[in-house]
Image: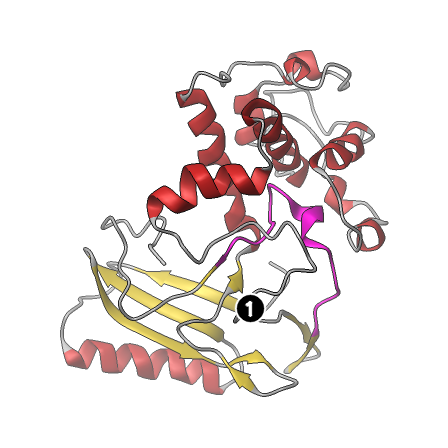
Amino acid sequence: MRTVTLIMFLAGAIPLGAESTRERMASLVRSYADAGLFSGVVLVTKGNSNVYAEAFGLADSALNVPNTLQSRFHIASLSKPITAVAILKLVEQGKLSLNDPLSKFVPDFPGGNKITVEELLTHYSGLADASADPDYNEWSRFPQTTASLVERAKKKSPESEPGTHYFYSNSNYHILAFIIEKQSGQSYGEFLAKEIFQPSGMNNTAHQGNDGAIVENLVRGYNPAGAAGFENAPYLDWTSKTGNGSSPTKSFATSTACPSPSGSFCRV
């Protein structure tokens, strides 16, 4: 993750319900926040109830703006499970199969006839990571399309034969975002909104497909600098992360609750 601003989900790790438990939790997290080691929001749920929710640190260090329960965070690679759900929605709709080869969607992709959708999902495609290229910090500053991201993946030499080794590659999820657009006839962000966010009540979550758009309460990101300092994270256009880390944003409000005990896809 690029920033030191985090969202923490804690469920079932400690006994819940007693005021003393909440006080101990607040004291523990506050010790990290006061030491400059944590900035973000902590949410603890039990069943459909929020037991503890509190914001720590700054959303904008330059302007001294504190994080609140309405702050919205870039969630980076936590976007990947959302992309995976979108792919499974298309499978459910009969618009693709997990056994479909990549060549079905990108006919000229090198070795695409040997790579399946499932291998893209599970990082067993053998594809290298275009985000690891030396020039990534240059091209990621500019708007990208899913097609342009696929073109970059095409140019990378594979890490291994498909299905033989696990290799975590952002390129897999760039390609999955392209497949979502091709098979749904919608943009990546539109499909996520219609098929996942709106039905789940995730009203403050979205794909950041337009870097010029103003996102209310969006938290700035920072990188560590030295032993105890921070600096602004390098700028990037979030379309360069479409599918793998294109920062759906979310906020926590004290009246919200997760729709399932597992805490997956918290309602916001």
Give percent across and percent down for residue 267: 33, 55
Where on the picture, by quarter, is residue 184? top right
Residue drawn at the location 74% of the way across and 58% of the way down: 236
| Position of 171 relative to 103 (above/below) | below
- Between residues 196 and 106, which one lies in front from this camera angle? 196
Q: How is the image coloured?
A: secondary structure
Give percent across and percent down for residue 73: 52, 64
| Position of 53 relative to 74 (above/below) | below
> In the figure, is residue 56 to the left or right of 189?
left
Give percent across and percent down for residue 237: 72, 55
Under tag 1, what secondary structure? Answer: loop
> In the figure, is residue 115 to the left or right of 254?
right
Question: Label 1 sits on what residue type?
Answer: Leu
* Region of the chain picked out in magenta, as a range: 232-249
Question: Is 235 colored magenta in this rendering?
Answer: yes
Residue corresponding to mark 1:
218
